[in-house]
Image: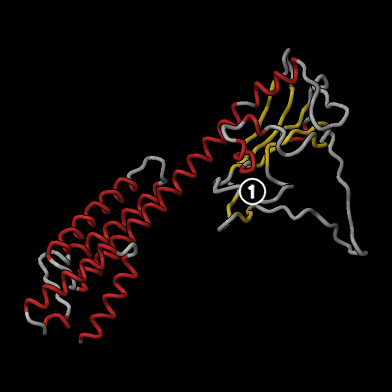
């Protein structure tokens, strides 16, 4: 694409007498904080001149926009003249809805119009109508990228919220199966489970999610609903409590219910109740 407009020079570089030349380690994926991402789409850019012709051409490599690209030699929407970078990778960051989204982006704009002139330090361009025309045409690109970043961030937040609700349902199911709480506490747990499943259903119906993601989430919901169905109508009772007199059993259930209500962590609370029950057995 660039070769149609720019005279590119290829240099054959061989190290240590090796027969095969050495190339830059280009690849289709890259590491980000907590995982990796993959380039998925090449968007070509053509910017017309103020009075016809071509002002600039360029490209953007779209990916999953899961976070900032780590390499300083890669991230950012850059400007180049004569195939030489002008300024830093943050030269266009003010055009993004949030400047941080520039570091999520990978792309270059190659300036063709000779009237768009780098300044003496080559850290920016001379301000004139032709440079302003370039910026006017570039401006929609950072906004689109910013929207992609926000949409990707929202999707990840929904998926995290889904997993949190799923974990909460499983914890409450195990507490009910433990059979150590009062009837009122069990009803409250069942109401919380129903509320969590409803929230998970709303997340799974988000239009921004892919069909594959929706299918996966709805399958998880169905499995949980099946587990909840097995709870209905069944009376669970902790075996150590069944040997106690009715008054002591009710008092123990009340104490265990208070442990769950007052504990900031249900997993820790259940572990504590399990230990107490083991001492009673």
Q: In this view, does 170 lie above or below 98?
A: below
Q: In this view, does 41 lie above or below 136?
A: below
- Image quadrant of residue 84? top right
Picture coordinates of residue 115 (x, y %)?
Answer: 82, 19
Characterize the local packing of mark 1: few (<14), some (14-19) or many (20 or more) Cα atoms within 10 angstroms. many
Residue at 57% from the left image edge and 48% from the top image edge? 67
Farthest residue to the right: give it: 17
Farthest residue toward the top? Answer: 51
- Percent position (x, y) of residue 266? 31, 65
Quadrant location of the C terminus in the rendered image: bottom left
Residue at the image position 35 percent from the left and 54 percent from the top: 217
**Circle count:** 1
Q: Residue furthest left?
A: 246
Q: Is residue 32 left or right of residue 11?
A: left
Q: In this view of the protein, which residue sits in the foreground, 63 or 118?
A: 118
Dot 1: element: loop
Which residue is drawn at the image coordinates 29% and 72% (left, top)? Answer: 270
Residues 243 and 68: in front is 243
In the picture, the quarter occupied by the N terminus is top right
Q: In which quarter of the image is residue 5?
A: top right
The spot of residue 175 in percent (x, y) is 24, 69
What residue is disc 1 on? 69
Left or right: 190 in relation to 31: left
What colour scheme was applied to this rendering of the protein? Answer: secondary structure
Who's the residue at 30% across and 45% down the image? 202
Q: Residue 124 at x, y = what percent?
A: 79, 29
Q: Nearer the viewer, residue 83 or 128?
A: 128
């Amino acid at each position: 694409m660039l070769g149609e407009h720019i005279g590119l020079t290829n240099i054959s570089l061989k190290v240590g007498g090796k027969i095969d030349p050495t190339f830059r380690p280009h690849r289709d994926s890259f590491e980000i904080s907590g995982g990796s991402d993959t380039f998925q789409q090449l968007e070509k850019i053509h910017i017309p001149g103020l009075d016809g012709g071509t002002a600039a051409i360029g490209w953007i490599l779209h990916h999953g926009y899961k976070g900032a690209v780590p390499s300083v030699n890669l991230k950012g929407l850059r400007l180049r003249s004569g195939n030489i970078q002008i300024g830093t990778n943050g030269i266009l960051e003010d055009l993004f809805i949030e400047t941080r989204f520039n570091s999520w982006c990978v792309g270059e704009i190659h300036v063709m119009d000779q009237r768009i002139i780098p300044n003496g330090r080559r850290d920016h361009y001379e301000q004139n109508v032709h440079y302003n025309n370039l910026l006017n045409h570039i401006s929609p690109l950072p906004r689109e990228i910013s929207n992609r970043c926000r949409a990707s961030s929202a999707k990840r937040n929904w998926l995290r919220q889904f997993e949190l609700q799923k974990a909460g349902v499983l914890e409450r199911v195990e507490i009910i199966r433990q059979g150590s709480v009062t009837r009122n506490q069990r009803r409250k747990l069942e109401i919380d489970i129903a509320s969590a499943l409803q929230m998970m259903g709303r997340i799974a119906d988000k239009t921004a999610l892919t069909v594959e993601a929706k299918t996966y989430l709805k399958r998880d919901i169905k499995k949980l609903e099946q587990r909840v169905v097995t709870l209905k109508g069944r009376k669970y009772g902790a075996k150590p409590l069944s040997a106690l007199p009715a008054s002591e059993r009710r008092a123990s259930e009340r104490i265990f219910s208070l442990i769950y209500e007052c504990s900031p962590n249900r997993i820790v609370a259940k572990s504590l109740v399990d230990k107490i029950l083991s001492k009673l057995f």
